[in-house]
Image (cartoon, rainbow, N blue to C red):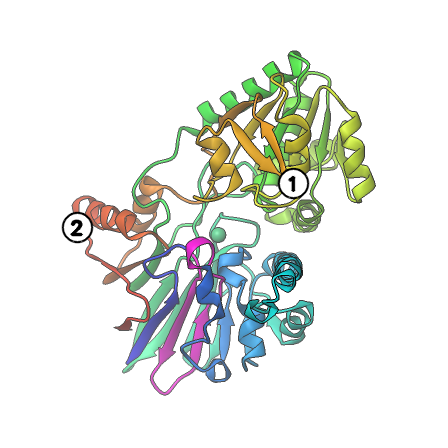
Amino acid sequence: MATVISYGAAGVVTGSCHLFSIEGGPNILIDCGMFQGQEEDLNYSSFDFDPSQIDYLLVTHAHLDHVGRIPKLVKEGFAGIIYATDATQDLTEIILLDSAKIMKEDYETNYRKAQRRGKEDDIVEPLYEEIDVEAAFDLTWHHPEYDQPFTLEKGITVTYRNAGHILGSAFIEIAYQEHGVEQTIVFSGDIGNDNDMVLPDLEKCTHADYLYVESTYGDRDHQNAETSITEFKRIIIDTLNNWGNVLIPSFAIERTQEILCILKEMHHRKELPECKIFLDSPMATRATEVYRNHSDLLSQECQDIKKRDGTIFDFEDLVYTLDVKASKAINDVDRRAIIIAGSGMCTGGRILHHFKNRLWNRKNAVIFIGYQAVGTLGRHIVDGARWVKIYHEDILIRASVHTVNSFSAHADQSAIVRWISQIEGLHRVFLIHGEEDKQVILRSVLKNALHQKAHIVEPEEVIYL
Ligand SMILES: [Zn+2]
């Protein structure tokens, strides 16, 4: 009998980690992500399985909540084979090195603070270091191509299909034999939003017996994409025409590349007033380079832009600022600048410097394009804070604050239901990667719309297939 146990992303959104075991066969782990936000402390407990007993790790995509504990897995004994698309491996390397760097910086800051109080023994060591990230890349990585089934072991065939979520993302189909009968289980990873300008749409899943599906937005539909993009453009044009500056806190992967594409097209159509655009994020710059290197995986729209201009993410007036000196020089531009910088939720990174220098000016605008978690500076500002503390200084917010919501890289409720409705032969659906209240709503929508029963997976619950 085959079983699945979810060691993360069960009842919560983060920490994706599912162990699929076939009786007398291999142990296959699907993703090994980091817990984030309120669940962060869970990262520091040992795995509730033996990493040395895992034969294969199948990675769906490079977001931290799907790959963030891979170095820990390796540190604790995993020595198997890793499967990820080529683009996913490239992005994973950027993500994990950045994560190790942030943990090291946080540790050093906390250690200094604790040392002053004589309590340095209380400080938790980083989850892993750069050297552990390198060890993960010393293992064997295979790069499946989309829609090309491959044999994992005798009787087990795996197919990666385009999930349209971020570059290289996949949902994974595993076909295996059970008492001579072929069964197929599909792990959705995160599935994409059809309105993404940069990536092709989520691929159809035609057949599955069992489905593990994400439910991040299981309770709602996104704002209409066209209306949101029109609104996004209007804020930019109005602010620049009024001699102000636009600040866009952005996630390094996917969101940034989409914004760059929109701005490039505005520039091409002469909709953009004369301005300077700065991508002030070394990580987003590196991620954009990976997008360039894998441009064959991008949408038809991007292919057309490349054919027209020879490049997808570059145009005059767009500056990639790499070093700190170039970043500081942005301060000298007092009007008509668009500054895109991380971190996406304003918990660190260069966006803080730009906020400090520009939030006080009523001519400026801030556009939030991603989800802002409770407790982050971004959320505080979105919720209407008048004053914020940045680098020990109180800053009065006079800039206008906007939220444009349609840039989500996740499928919304209608898209999830539509995707599931196309799957033939489905016996059982398991909901993962979502908050419980949202999963309850999705479960009842699936029952009413598709007469499909769905089970909300509990952490470490053993599911017998
Ligand atoms: Zn994701």
> Which type of secondary structure does the marked residue at label 1 adopt?
loop
Whether disc 2's CB lies below 8 Å from ligand 1 is answered no
Q: Residue furthest front?
A: 117
> Which type of secondary structure does the marked residue at label 2 adopt?
loop
Give the magenta-colored segment's residue range. Answer: 14-39
Foreground pick, 282 / 211: 282
Mark 1 to mark 2 CA distance (whole Å): 54 Å
> Who's the residue at 68% across and 49% down the image?
283
Position of the C terminus, as image quadrant, is bottom left
Q: Are marks 1 and 2 in contact (CB under 8 Å)?
A: no
Query: Does residue 94 appear left or right of residue 62 in this picture?
Result: right
Type of amino acid at the residue the image marks with label 1:
Tyr
Foreground pick, 225 / 441: 441
Residue 383 highlighted magenta (yes or no): no
Q: Nearer the viewer, mark 1 or mark 2?
A: 1
Position of the N terminus, as image quadrant, is bottom left
Residue denoted by label 2: 451
Type of amino acid at the residue the image marks with label 2:
His
> Is 107 rendered above or below residue 221?
below
Residue 26 highlighted magenta (yes or no): yes
Residue denoted by label 1: 391
Query: Does residue 267 appear left or right of residue 422 in this picture?
Result: right
Mark 1 closeness class: few <14, some 14–19, many ≥20 residues within 10 Å? few
